[in-house]
Amino acid sequence: MGSPSTATRRVLVIDDDPGYGRMAYRYLQTHGFQARLAPTGTKGQVQIEAFKPEIILLDIHLPDIDGIALYKALKIDPRTRDIPIILITAEVYLDSLLEAAVKGLQAESVFFKGNADMLGLMQRIRETLENPCQKTEPAKVSDKKILIIDDDLEVQDLVRLTLAQKYPHLQFCDRGKEGFHLTLEHRPDLILLDMVMPDLNGIGVFKLLKSHDQTKDIPVLVMTGMPEEGNVIKDAVAMLGASDFVHKPFGEDELLRHVDRLIRSGPTHPPAILEKGPLKLDVKSRSVWICDEPLTNLSPKEFDLLAYLVGKSPAVAKWPEILMNVWGQPVDVSSENCPHEAIEVRSRTLRAKLGEAGCCIVTHKGVGLQFDSGRFRNKPAK
């Protein structure tokens, strides 16, 4: 029978393993605890409201809600943040991501249930109840809204796991066009954007965001896992006005550090004027001047190409970089067989329209294009 100190203590078990859950329930009853069992996170939340447990046994893996995410949610809520929670798991050896997440929670305890040591579990519950931690200080919760546009569900889970406690106003979508429409509708304070998605890639989403007054100043953190593309994406996001860049796989601390900084810095205001040699470009109005004379006959794609080359100057823009950043087509940047014929045709047309300044656009055979302002010489006065 249970001791007087446990006879009225209420314990909630949230575990989808019916064998372990029922065994824990029976042991709790036998040892004098009042016990309830919930097989899902959702039902566990209902039981928390109705049963008002004094301690919770929470499985890390649940069928409907990630156990760690539920833990964070409970520790945010002022009604539940002071309830001790013992995390339970059948995994003796946690993978590195899960282990880091569990350590970061600073939970009251983690109990490995693989050996079905129920007496050990009862002792752990008593010790936790008899030596409660100090009451949790209210977490500093931000009211900022963050939109995550990424079709990788594992990345979505990691972002939710990392940010939910401090930034509870998270919204997720897995399509670029949907992300743009959600941005227009909800006006998030920060966007986390993947570069490769099935319908509209990150470059395309960027262009939509930067072309609308309602969205152009929202800071954007670029996330990408494409191999060997770091410099290419950094060039692209710099040209388009992105705020920061993080490469997958990233750690929780790294992601939170980037997000905190961007939330603090607020809306972005990228430089609107590019000047190099004889050229001056106003990115916002999409205007071009050559030696202070306006050039008005460039097509939208020609302007994009010129702006990219000028912004990257004096470095050479490789064919895959141009195809990704100007045409919005993700390619393997290490490939030597990038289709660049269309770019060369467009560059010849652009040179012709630039007149004497066209000599600044240099083709490096087998490599790409460069804007070299040193090639320009003012026409001698007559």
Image (spheres, grey):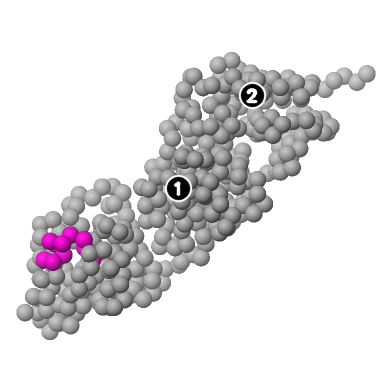
In this rendering, position of residue 217 left or right of residue 31: right
**Which amino acid does the dot numbered 1 rest on?**
Asp
The residue carrying pointer 2 sits among few (fewer than 14), some (14 to 19) or many (20 or more) residues within 10 Å by Cα, namely many
In this rendering, position of residue 32 left or right of residue 291: left
**Which amino acid does the dot numbered 2 rest on?**
Gln
What residue is disc 2 on? Answer: 370
Q: In the rendered image, which quarter contains the C terminus?
A: top right
Residue at (59, 40) in percent of width and height: 238
Q: Position of residue 168 (x, y in %)?
A: 44, 63
Please state which of residues 7 and 231 is positioned toward the viewer in this rendering.
Answer: 7
Q: Position of residue 210 (x, y in %)?
A: 63, 46
Counting residues from the start of the chain, the first of labels 1 and 2 encountered is: 1
Q: Position of residue 95 (x, y in %)?
A: 26, 47
Dot 2 falls on a residue whose secondary structure is strand
What residue is disc 1 on? Answer: 174
Q: Which stretch appears magenta?
A: 14-23
Q: Position of residue 148 (x, y in %)?
A: 47, 51
Please state which of residues 297 and 280 is positioned toward the viewer in this rendering.
Answer: 297
Residue at (58, 28) in percent of width and height: 322
Residue at (61, 38) in percent of width and height: 239
Residue 22 lies in the magenta-colored region: yes
Residue at (55, 16) in percent of width and height: 366
Vertical placement of residue 101 versus 40, above or below: above
Vertical placement of residue 369 versus 79, above or below: above
